[in-house]
Amino acid sequence: MSDPMKYLSNAQDCLCKATVAANSELRDRWLDLAESWLAMVPQDLRTLEKIFERALQGQGLQPHALKTRH
C-alpha cells in the first residue's frame, strides 16, 4: 500500500538537499528525485503538490523549474 505522506516527506528531504547542493548538477539531480517522489502521490491528493510548490518558492526556487528541466 502506498503512503503519500511518506512520498511528500521524501520529496521535501530531496528539496532540502537541493538547496544546499555543492553544484548545479547535484541540485538538478535532487530536484529530479523530488519530482519523482511527487509523481507517486495519487491524483486525488495532488493538491498537496501545491504545498510543495509553495515550499519551493520559499526556498527561492521556481516551481516550474521541475517541469522545464527535462
Image (cartoon, rainbow, N blue to C red):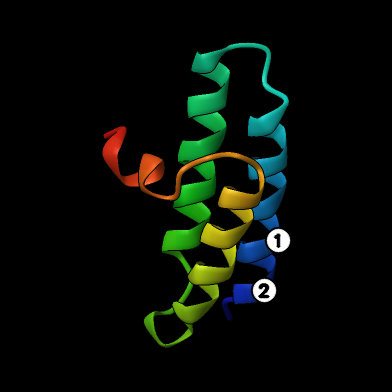
Give the side of residue 14 with respect to residue 26, left or right: right
Question: Residue at position x 44%, y 79% from top?
Answer: 42
Identify residue for label 1.
9
Res 48 → quadrant: bottom right
Check if mark 1's residue and mark 2's residue have beta carbons within 8 Å. yes
Give the side of residue 64 with respect to residue 57, left or right: left
Question: Residue at position x 68%, y 53% from top?
Answer: 12
Q: Is residue 20 above or below residue 2?
A: above
Q: Is residue 24 above or below residue 28?
A: above
Amino acid at pointer 1: Ser
Secondary structure under tag 1 reads helix
Question: Residue at position x 59%, y 11% from top?
Answer: 23
Please provide percent x and percent y for residue 9: 71, 61
Residues under labels 1 and 2: Cα distance? 6 Å
Please provide percent x and percent y for residue 3: 63, 76
Instruction: Pick the quarter of the image with the C terminus.
Output: top left
Please provide percent x and percent y for residue 11: 61, 53
Rate crowding at label 2 as few (under 14), some (14 to 19) or many (20 or more) other CA atoms within 10 Å.
Answer: few
For residue 25, say whether it is visible.
Answer: yes
Give the side of residue 13 with respect to residue 27, left or right: right
Residue 5: mark in rendering: 2
Q: Is residue 44 above or below residue 21?
A: below
Amino acid at pointer 2: Met
